[in-house]
Amino acid sequence: MSQFCLRGSDRTVRAARWAAAALLALVAGTACSGGDSSGPTVEPPVITVSGISDGAVVEEPVTISVTIDGGTFQATLNGNPFFSGGTVAEPGSYLLRVEATNAGGTSVREIGFEIRFTGESLLIIRMMNLGDNAAGGGGDAILVTDSSAAGMRHALIDAGPAGVDASDPGFVHRRLVELGVDTLEIVLLTHAHSDHYQGMPAVINGLRVEEFVYNGQIRFLSGYQAVVSAANARAGVVTVPSGTETRSLGLAGDPTTLTLVPGLPDNLGASTNDGSDLNDGSLGMALSKGAFRMFFTGDGEVDANLRWRTEFASLTGDLSVLKVGHHGANDAVFDGGFAGSGTQWLEHTGADVHLVSSNGTTHPRIAALNALLGRPGATYCTSVHGEIALRATAAGQWTVSVERNAEVDCVPGGDATS
Ligand SMILES: [Zn+2]
């Protein structure tokens, strides 16, 4: 708003810190412009602010630089410390105040501005198609992206290998690079099965990972231990949630919220049997943006579904989208497991859309798919529809788009017999 100078003789100089500067100016025989001319003139510092101008109203985040031609300065933004080069990303009204001091006196500059976003932020969920991967039921790899004026911020849930016999562990990393992802704020491994972690080393070693979250499972498999080692070596933080924890992508006033639900405690020790016990130890994750709500299940089956339904009902009920557990296995859909009975889990989740990551050979299972197709809303499978993308706005509108076969229903895996 203004730039002005305080001189040693100025009666307005009362604050002790300013008095010290004024005293220095007098001792040095200096003065502000227009002041005492008895000695060599030393001007007060000139403050230069770039990136924003006084009175500006901008529609994007701003990065602000402050420089002075001598001395030192302190800056505040709405009263809080601000450092040159900082970015202001949230909408609101701001006052930047810079106070600079050197032997010539003190300068103060104030700049008022406003950030007012007019565009709409977007949540994008991509369930990758891992193809004929025979491991598990097809593997999982899901990218969650918040796109707003603050930029694209990403979380990855699982990184299974692709291809026949899991022949392509680098697929997820390559797909992320294709999508322009260089930083993942969160990489979440739901559980310790290779169809969920075999692509992790390429991701962790090839991209910047700020936080790696897993369920803490102990397994004496070199491939699994390599993933945990890579995460400990390269991720900014490694987290094993012991209770629900939340993370946020996007703007503070328009966040995409991730709520982590720890795995079943009894299923996480070194004595956990392979198969269903590991599946039921899957980390769960609830995702919300505005009215949009989704729950991710990993390969959770009967025990996990029961716990999510009864102990975490508010996170798992009345969903927009359910990521179906275990590639569309009967155990992951029916309350009674493989026998194929009971649909309280599906009724509780009440999803408008079910997403199934499946290989099309062993999964999805026949009974599970019939139950899903019998529900209101649509069911999409990677084995039929390819990569599935979902886009949601904070206002609650959302759409599903698929890579292929949009007009046809999911079909059971070709080798599924029940
Ligand atoms: Zn799996």
Image (cartoon, rainbow, N blue to C red):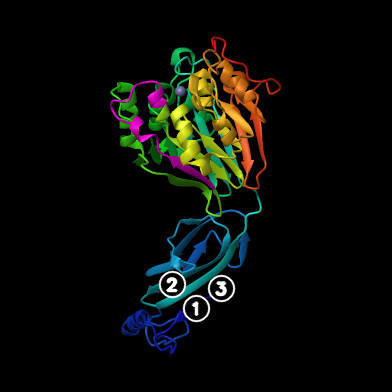
Q: SS of the residue at dot 2?
A: strand
Task: Say whether marks 1 and 2 touch (CB < 8 Å).
Answer: no
- CA distance separating discs 1 and 3: 10 Å
Q: Classify 10 Å Cα crowding around label 3: few (below 14), some (14-19), many (20 and above).
A: few
Front residue of 353/196: it is 353
The quadrant the C terminus occupies is: top right
Give the labeled residue for mark 3: 1
Give the labeled residue for mark 1: 4
Looking at the picture, how far across and down is residue 263, in whole percent?
A: 40, 35
Q: Classify 10 Å Cα crowding around label 1: few (below 14), some (14-19), many (20 and above).
A: few
Q: Is residue 52 left or right of residue 38?
A: right
Q: Is residue 350 above or below residue 22?
A: above
**Quarter of the figure with residue 400:** top right
The span shown in magenta is 256-279
Is 309 one of the magenta-colored residues? Answer: no
Q: Which residue shows up at 60% across the image and 28% down it?
A: 388
Front residue of 312/294: it is 312
The quadrant the N terminus occupies is: bottom right
Give the labeled residue for mark 2: 99
Looking at the picture, how far across and down is residue 246, in whole percent?
A: 45, 46
Give, as a three-letter code, the residue at label 1.
Answer: Phe
Give, as a three-letter code, the residue at label 2.
Answer: Glu
Front residue of 374/237: it is 374
Q: SS of the residue at dot 3?
A: loop
- CA distance separating discs 3 and 2: 13 Å
The mark found on residue 20 in the picture is none
Looking at the picture, how far across and down is residue 214, in whole percent?
A: 38, 35
- CA distance separating discs 1 and 2: 10 Å
Q: Is residue 280 above or below residue 183?
A: above
